[in-house]
């Protein structure tokens, strides 16, 4: 296993119980919304066919990223491909190797139960857990979080479920099902960033998924309902909140925690340019902070090149700062891991620069202390 030192911080970040309650309230509200028929009617026309297919189960290891402000937490984005969950757990023991053996028994059981629940929902209760599982990613050994994938495989194997890390090309996948090395696979833990299964590499997995032959988690349905950046425009829109029949308290929660967000095509470009220092610009079809531009650093030429239909304009919410012994204060965000609206854990990520990078000396995942 790789050394965990490079991405674990020895800092401890304090978070108030009130702020944590607020974050949990929002996660539960958004999860409820994703199951609301009226909400789905608004979302489905905006997503590809693969995301309109409801597989009957959810998405393991989702995460919700927040910045803390003087007025409480603000949601920055939602991820279905929630890498770093095990590193977040290991932040409490920064000298430990990246291994499933280090996980506390209660957390180990909670994580495995999410995969068991997915299989039970997928199979209509016929299977209590997967018979064979693969972790799929593009060139996994080159990924920064490859050690975490290895730790998950350890976890599954110790659970009695044969598991392996594979590329899509190593699978024999079609509408007839999925095989790996000639053996059937009934669950894919999807770490691939082709969220809507639109690439040629994921075509076979897409066919098996749409045919109901494999439990794919996370999947396009969950991504379309919750993690596509365009959903932020719904959650922060008072008219959409009213159309969804939310209570005044639920509307107040969304307004307080979700920054104002809209597609560039929906705004006045001249006004947006004048107010650019108050905005951040995000491509809706990217991941991992790729292509994110802060308004105070964008040139007029670059601004005019932004594609109006696929650029999210989001109110800028600067990250808070955390003290780190031996280093200058670092920018901090909070990552709440969840399954079906239930918390799996909370961690902080400390960094310098424009976005979280997990490569800042003294930074990385840090434990949270509730105060």
Image (tube, grey):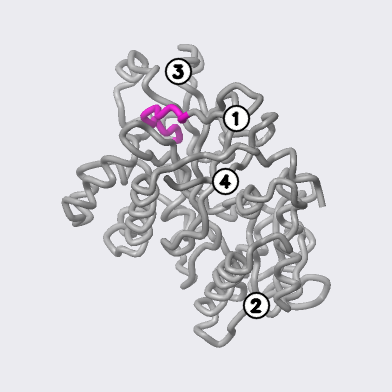
**Range covered by the magenta-colored residues:** 310-320
* CB within 8 Å, label 2 to label 1: no
Earlier residue among tags 2 and 4 = 2
Give the CA distance from mark 1 to mark 4: 12 Å
Residue topped by disc 3: 304
Rendered image: mark on residue 324? 1
Q: Name the N-terminal-most of marks 3 and 1.
A: 3
Q: Which residue is mark 4?
A: 367
Camera-nearest residue between 89 and 277: 89
Tell me the residue that label 2 is attached to.
Answer: 130
Question: Viewer-nearest of labels 2 and 3?
Answer: 2
Up the image or down, 75 lies above or below 138; here it is: above
Instruction: Give the mark, 4 or 3, whose residue is nearer the N terminus.
Output: 3
- Left or right: where does residue 30 sit relative to residue 310? left
SS type, badge 2: loop
- Residue 61 lies, in percent from the top left, at 55, 58
């Amino acid at each position: 296993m790789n050394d965990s030192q490079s991405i674990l911080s020895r800092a401890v970040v304090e978070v108030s119980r009130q702020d944590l309650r607020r974050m949990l309230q929002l996660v539960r509200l958004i999860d409820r919304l994703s199951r609301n028929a009226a909400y789905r009617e608004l979302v489905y026309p905006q997503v590809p066919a693969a995301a309109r297919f409801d597989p009957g189960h959810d998405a393991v290891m989702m995460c919700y990223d927040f910045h803390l402000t003087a007025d409480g937490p603000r949601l920055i984005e939602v991820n279905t491909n929630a890498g770093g969950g095990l590193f977040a757990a290991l932040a409490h023991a920064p000298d430990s190797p990246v291994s499933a053996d280090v996980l506390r028994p209660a957390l180990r059981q909670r994580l495995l139960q999410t995969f068991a629940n997915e299989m039970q929902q997928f199979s209509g209760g016929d299977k209590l857990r997967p018979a064979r599982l693969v972790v799929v990613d593009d060139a996994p050994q080159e990924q920064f979080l490859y050690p975490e994938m290895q730790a998950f495989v350890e976890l599954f194997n110790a659970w009695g479920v044969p598991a392996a890390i594979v590329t899509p090309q190593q699978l024999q996948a079609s509408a007839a099902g999925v095989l790996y090395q000639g053996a059937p696979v009934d669950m894919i833990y999807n770490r691939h960033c082709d969220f809507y299964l639109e690439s040629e590499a994921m075509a076979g997995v897409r066919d098996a998924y749409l045919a109901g032959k494999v439990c794919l988690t996370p999947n396009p349905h969950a991504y379309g309902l919750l993690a596509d950046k365009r959903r932020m425009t719904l959650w922060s829109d008072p008219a959409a909140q009213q159309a969804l029949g939310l209570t005044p308290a639920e509307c107040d929660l969304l307004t307080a925690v979700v920054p104002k967000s809209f597609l560039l095509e929906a705004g006045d470009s001249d006004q947006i340019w004048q107010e650019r220092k108050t905005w951040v610009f995000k491509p809706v079809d990217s991941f991992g902070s790729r292509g994110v531009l802060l308004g105070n650093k964008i040139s007029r030429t670059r601004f005019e090149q932004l594609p109006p239909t696929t650029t999210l304009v989001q109110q800028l919410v600067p990250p808070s700062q955390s003290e780190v012994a031996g280093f200058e204060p670092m920018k901090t965000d909070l990552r709440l891991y969840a399954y079906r609206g239930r918390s799996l854990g909370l961690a902080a990520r400390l960094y310098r620069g424009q976005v979280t990078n997990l490569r800042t000396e003294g930074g990385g995942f840090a434990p949270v202390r509730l105060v």
